[in-house]
Image (cartoon, helix red, strand yellow):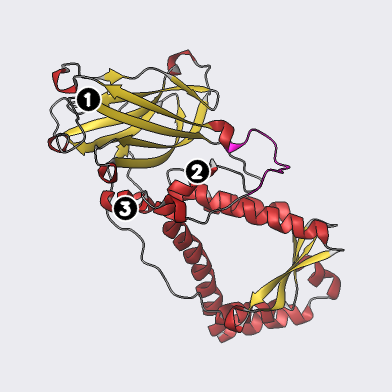
Amino acid sequence: MAATPSSTDELCSDQLEVHRTRLDSLDYWDTGDEDDDCGPRPSELYGTFTWTIYNFSQIDDKELRSNSFDVGGYKWCMLIYPQGVDNASVNLSLFLCVANHDELLPGWSHFAQFTLCIVNNDTTKSKYSDTLHRFWKKEYDWGWKKFVELSKLPDGFLVDDVLTIRAQVQVIWERVDRPFRCLDEPYRRELSKVYLTNAEAIVRRFVDERRRAISKSINDERIWSRLRAFWLRTDPSARMQLTRENTGTILRVMVKHFFVEKEVPSTLLMDSLYAGLKVMKQVCKNSEETVNIQWPGEDDSWSTPMVIIDKDNDMFVLADDPILLLERVALLDSGPHQRTGDCKSSENFSKV
């Protein structure tokens, strides 16, 4: 079953290779050692495997399978098609596979983010590809039909007729009720160098779309005057109910919107939201009653409270008249936009 690569996955291979050489300079999310989240840590669900294939040019087999390896409590292996899946291709095909898929109980699924790499003698030219996929009965392998052109293998990939392939696998235990941890810290650091700009663009687009919708309503005098009239007629007790929401409801919406299967930046977004939520909880713990989320002011300062976190009642509460808040949101500047990668990487799909 074929899958079209998402725009956030579409990065030039040379751009990806350059980013991966500067890992030490990255500031990334650190959730610390103390954690109240249930389940195993991402570091316990992450693993790597190196597959060395000798006498590669002499192989006549259509398909080669690596030894199995364990990551996150599951068995995995790599599949390679030296002449492509159709055995008449100019590209080498490479996949990650659930090694014991035919032995698992009905209804099984493993969700994982993974990176496959064919190592080049010049490490800056090694070929990487990343993806996010839910493995299950009908999609027990996933990867790239056109991972690398066969004609490029002699250019540093084949050394003494030896091909080296590495896999990084991060099993993910996702949740629907709140942001969750996804990535082992070093792996997150590596992926961030490639996809952080894309993750930021997703958040910026989310904010801009909603601000434009608010601005459109404000600019429609008929709609806005009716909304103002409705709010003025509403009694104080009803206003109180309309300006607060349970934190669980808000967090479910955030997870549903920002965690999209097949979108590699989704895991970075979840890690960021998880870390931010943890900071908010810590601030709540150290405060007496409430915590203010403030408006960005001039010169990067912070001014009037926008949202109050009521820790006792587990609520997000609007800190001011919602009409005034909406008008202020419409006037906010989202800041400069960054250009994201727009070049296509290898096509990822299942061979079954």
Contact flag, marks 1 and 3 (Cβ < 8 Å): no
Above or below, 107 against 183 in this view is above
- What is the CA distance from the residue labelled 3 to the residue labelled 2? 17 Å
Q: In the rendered view, does 149 fall on the left or right side of 24?
A: left
Q: In the rendered view, does 348 fall on the left or right side of 311?
A: left
The quadrant of the image that shows the C terminus is top left
- Specify the quadrant of the image occupied by residue 182: top right
Query: At numbered mark 3, what does the secondary structure look like: helix, strand or loop?
Result: helix
Where residue 198 sits in the image (x, y, percent)? 42, 58
- Judging by the rendered image, the residue that carries numbered circle 1 is 162
Q: Residue at x 51, y 50 (%)?
A: 268
Three-letter code for the amino acid on which mark 2 is drawn: Pro
Where residue 61 sits in the image (x, y, percent)? 19, 16
- Judging by the rendered image, the residue that carries numbered circle 3 is 18
- Judging by the rendered image, the residue that carries numbered circle 2 is 186
Whether the magenta-drawn stretch holds residue 32 is answered as yes
Q: Residue at x 53, y 16 (%)?
A: 105
- What is the CA distance from the residue labelled 1 to the residue labelled 3? 24 Å
- Which residues are the magenta region? 31-42
For residue 1, say whether it is visible: no
Q: Residue at x 12, y 36 (%)?
A: 151
